[in-house]
Amino acid sequence: MDKQTTLHLMCGKMASGKSTLAASLADKNNAILIIEDEWLSKLYPDEIRTINDYIKYSSRLQNIIRSHVISLLKHGTSVVLDFPANTIKQRNTLRSIFESADVTHTLHYVEASNEKCKEQLKKRNENNPEQTAFTSEAEFDFINQYFQPPSDTEHFNIIRY
């Protein structure tokens, strides 16, 4: 089987199912899965208390991860980045990775209504209380106001779910 090295990117509202899909994609494609939430919680424990903290530390993490992911891709290893590609700016930042590595990409867009996301968020909070940072309904509404669905004019290889 001919394997094409691919960078898989995740797009969708909070609690839409991106992380579940990312894990499945990594298994299916024999790819390395890099999960932003895991890295942030290990590198910056107890330092991310506000959304502004998240933005600060997430930016630092992206700077660290970028060259690592490019190296993996250049060596023929596909990567699933479970990092948000939820705004045009975020997607353009992630675009620079696959362009620098000169590999193909897929933007996996999980479409879900606000109601479905809030329902899944509530279940996640009940089942995984350690993952409850920024997971209240009010925080969902605040973060969701910045969500920008991908458009064909951005020229990504989009698969919609």
Image: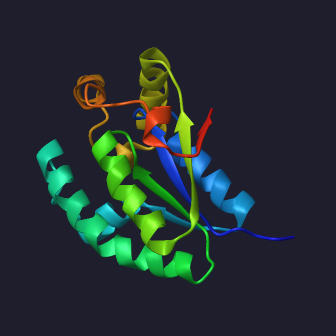
Question: What residue appears at the point 37 percent right and 39 percent down from the top-left corner?
Answer: 86
Which residue lies most toward the right here? 1
Coordinates of residue 131 in the picture (x, y in percent): 37, 47
In the image, taking residue 44 as reference, residue 161 lies left or right, namely right
Name the residue located 43 percent from the left edge and 40 percent from the top edge: 154
- The residue at the point 76 percent across, 70 percent down is 3
Quadrant assignment for the C terminus = top right
Measuring from the top left, give residue 38's x and y in whole percent. Answer: 39, 62
Q: How many marks?
A: 0
Give x and y (percent) for residue 113.
48, 18
The colour scheme used to paint the residues is rainbow
Residue 46 in view (yes/no): no
Q: Is residue 70 above or below residue 120?
A: below
Question: Between residues 50 and 114, which one lies in front from this camera angle?
Answer: 114
Residue closest to the eye, 41 or 99: 99
Left or right: where 141 falls relative to 149: left
The N terminus - image quarter: bottom right
- Quadrant of residue 79 within the rendered picture: bottom right
- Depth check: give the residue in front, 123 or 39: 39
